[in-house]
Image (cartoon, grey):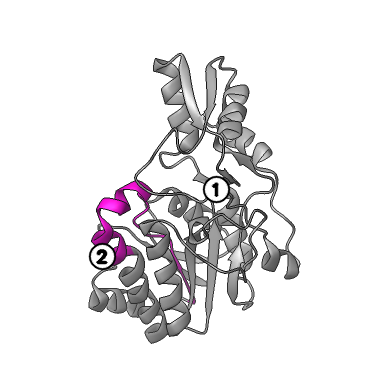
Amino acid sequence: MRILIIGSEGMLGHDLVDALSIENEVNTTTIDTLDITDIDKTIQTVKEMKPDVLVHAAAYTDVDGSESNSDLAYKVNALGTRNVAVACHEADCAMVYICTDYVFDGTKGSSYYEYDQTNPLSVYGKTKLAGEVYIRDTLNKFYIVRTSWLYGFHGPNFVTTMLNLAESNDTISVVNDQIGSPTYTVDLAAAIGELIKKPAYGIYHVTNSDYCSWYEYAKQIFHNAGVNIDLKPVTTEEFPRPAPRPKYSVMENYNWKMEGYPKLRSYKQALKDYMKLL
């Protein structure tokens, strides 16, 4: 297949290029070569490249920054995604959209299925959901892939943040009442590679298996790294951030399972493999 990856310079984008190049012809754009907020340029670029599948991995991902830069977040995540969807419609190609667990409010108290009601709390979550709506309104051939708590070798992430903090602090406070599934970009990229092999379009939750709080995640990181540090669990209220986050955003990978795909490995095993690279 001919595949176009938009946002190939990002943390996930790098791993998508590696994973999808194995069996496909891959073309890429970066923030420097394509401004997705320019609808005419976006349509022109996609039509020229003639992909069978376009993977849209570009986004404004600064969750807290989105609260104070809501226009920019909307322009990139909502309107930019609309522009990519329109371009896919014009070029008659399927689209993969990387979305987020932050489309949920976290009050369900159990794992979210693909068909559960969305109710984003943050500007980031709202703009990413708006992107979903534009895709569903514009296209018939799409895979909306919701994932969570991404980390990978090609970008800043929670793992590297924790390890950097440990170098200059004896004590670190980490939130213990937000629960999710850390997901390795290498595993997500491989899963997307499987997903696009058949036209089973729709919404998919794709995360590594098992779940934890940010505090438990940090404990696992320091255990793997052999770092002794005083780690203090705190509540969300004790560690306020500009953007509200869902308390429990674990996602059931239900459509993935129903299509017969094997569940992704535990985040604990993936984390070990990732940390060997650091």
Can residue 276 be seen in this snapshot? Answer: no
Q: Residue at x 45, y 39 (%)?
A: 157
Foreground residue, 218 or 27? 218
Which region of the structure is painted magenta? 52-76
- Which x, y percent locates residue 228? 56, 14
- Which x, y percent locates residue 205? 61, 62
Q: Residue at x 36, y 79 (%)?
A: 87
Which residue is tagged 2? 35
Which residue is tagged 1? 247
At label 1, the amino acid type is: Lys
Sequence order check: which comes first, mark 1 or mark 2?
A: 2
Q: Residue at x 52, y 60 (%)?
A: 104
At label 2, the amino acid type is: Asp
Q: Residue furthest front?
A: 237
Asked where in the image residue 195 lies, by quadrant, the reply is bottom right
Judge whether 42 appears above or below 184 on screen: below
The reply to whether the magenta stretch includes residue 64 is: yes
SS at mark 1 in the image: loop
- Which x, y percent locates residue 123? 36, 58
Q: Is residue 14 left or right of residue 221?
A: left
Query: In front: mark 1 or mark 2?
Result: 1
Q: Is residue 243 left or right of residue 189?
A: left
Measured in 3D between alpha carbons, the distance from the residue under mark 1 to the one under mark 2, in whole angstroms, is 34 Å
Q: Residue at x 52, y 47 (%)?
A: 149
| Number of residues whose C-alpha sits closer than 10 Å to that of mark 1, classed few (under 14), some (14–19) or many (20 or more) | some
Asked where in the image residue 251 lies, by quadrant, the reply is bottom right
Where's the N terminus, which quadrant? bottom right
Judge whether 131 appears above or below 8 on screen: below
